[in-house]
Image (cartoon, rainbow, N blue to C red):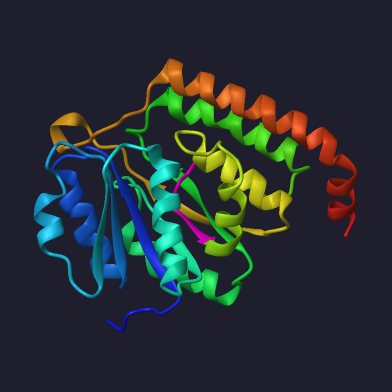
């Protein structure tokens, strides 16, 4: 497989356990290059992978845990420095469909100014609270952007234009933890980056299958509530510009 000079796969990982190796292997079978960003992990899950680094597979190790958004930003800054223009971000826990990486990258190459968003197709094992709760976040994200076409605000399987996302993140302190995915899509929409929605299946693994989740229902929903309060207040200030954008 010929390495891409423009599009890289970024996999942020924090204490993902044994399922990390399978996730990385699936991504490497689908695309070159793949970068793993180890976000202060202390479970040893990335040790063997770091020893397997090659020209098409790189491991970036952060000394301290900085959250998903912080890990993604570290990877984006380095990718931009290396000349990459786009990054597909996928979770390390095996939930995202590695066999659709090439499809998402092709959509990005056809529309390089767009944000390619995965829209989750849930299986029967998906937790009802997670499936139902995301509808609330999706409604708020679409309100904050005046229904600019965001298919899903929380699903993290996406291809980002690197320069736009780095510009959005560099000068503000938010978007570093569970708030990264929804705030990124809202702020990119404000920036005029058009979303392209592509369906993608999501799988939730049971603990006995190696499934690992760092989602905390109370803590992370409080974080999302605070995030949407901030974004809605800011969207009111942006309303004249958003209206003109939508009219165009």
Region rendered in magenta: 154-160
146 w.r.t. 3: above or below: above
Magenta region includes residue 114: no
Quadrant location of the N terminus?
bottom left
Q: Nearer the viewer, residue 81 or 220?
A: 81
Q: Residue at x 18, y 45 (%)?
A: 19
Q: Residue at x 78, y 36 (%)?
A: 235
What x and y, as percent, mark residue 167?
61, 55
Q: Residue at x 32, y 29 (%)?
A: 214
127 w.r.t. 50: above or below: above
Q: Residue furthest top?
A: 218
42 w.r.t. 128: above or below: below
Q: Residue at x 37, y 33 (%)?
A: 126
What x and y, as percent, mark residue 226?
60, 23
What x and y, as percent, mark residue 201?
40, 49
Count of number-bearing discs? 0
Quadrant location of the C terminus?
bottom right
Q: Nearer the viewer, residue 180 or 122?
A: 180
State the image quarter where residue 50 is shown: bottom left
From this viewpoint, is residue 151 visible?
no
126 w.r.t. 7: above or below: above
Q: Is residue 180 left or right of residue 100?
A: right
Magenta region includes residue 156: yes
From this viewpoint, is residue 27 visible?
yes
Q: Is residue 236 left or right of residue 212?
A: right
State the image quarter where residue 194 is shown: bottom right
Q: Is residue 113 left or right of residue 120?
A: right
């Amino acid at each position: 497989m010929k390495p891409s000079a423009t599009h890289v796969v970024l996999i942020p990982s924090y204490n993902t356990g044994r399922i990390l190796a399978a996730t990385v292997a699936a991504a490497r079978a689908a695309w070159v290059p793949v970068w793993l960003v180890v976000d202060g992990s202390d479970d040893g899950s990335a040790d063997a992978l770091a020893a397997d680094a090659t020209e098409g597979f790189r491991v970036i190790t952060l000394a301290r845990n900085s959250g998903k958004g912080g890990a993604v930003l570290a990877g984006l800054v380095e990718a931009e420095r290396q000349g990459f223009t786009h990054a597909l971000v996928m979770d390390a826990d095996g939930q995202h469909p590695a066999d659709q990486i090439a499809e998402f990258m092709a959509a990005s190459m056809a529309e390089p100014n767009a944000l390619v968003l995965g829209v989750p197709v849930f299986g029967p094992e998906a937790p009802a609270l997670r499936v139902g709760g995301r509808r609330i976040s999706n409604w708020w994200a679409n309100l904050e952007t005046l229904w600019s076409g965001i298919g899903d605000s929380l699903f993290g399987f996406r291809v980002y234009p690197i320069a736009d996302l780095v510009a959005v993140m560099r000068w503000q302190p938010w978007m570093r933890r569970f708030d990264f995915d929804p705030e990124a899509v809202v702020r990119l929409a404000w920036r005029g980056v058009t979303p392209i929605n592509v369906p993608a299946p999501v799988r939730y693994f049971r603990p006995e299958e190696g499934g690992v989740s760092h989602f905390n229902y109370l803590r992370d929903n409080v974080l999302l509530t605070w995030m949407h309060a901030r974004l809605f207040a800011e969207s009111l200030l942006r309303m004249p510009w958003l209206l003109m954008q939508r009219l165009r």
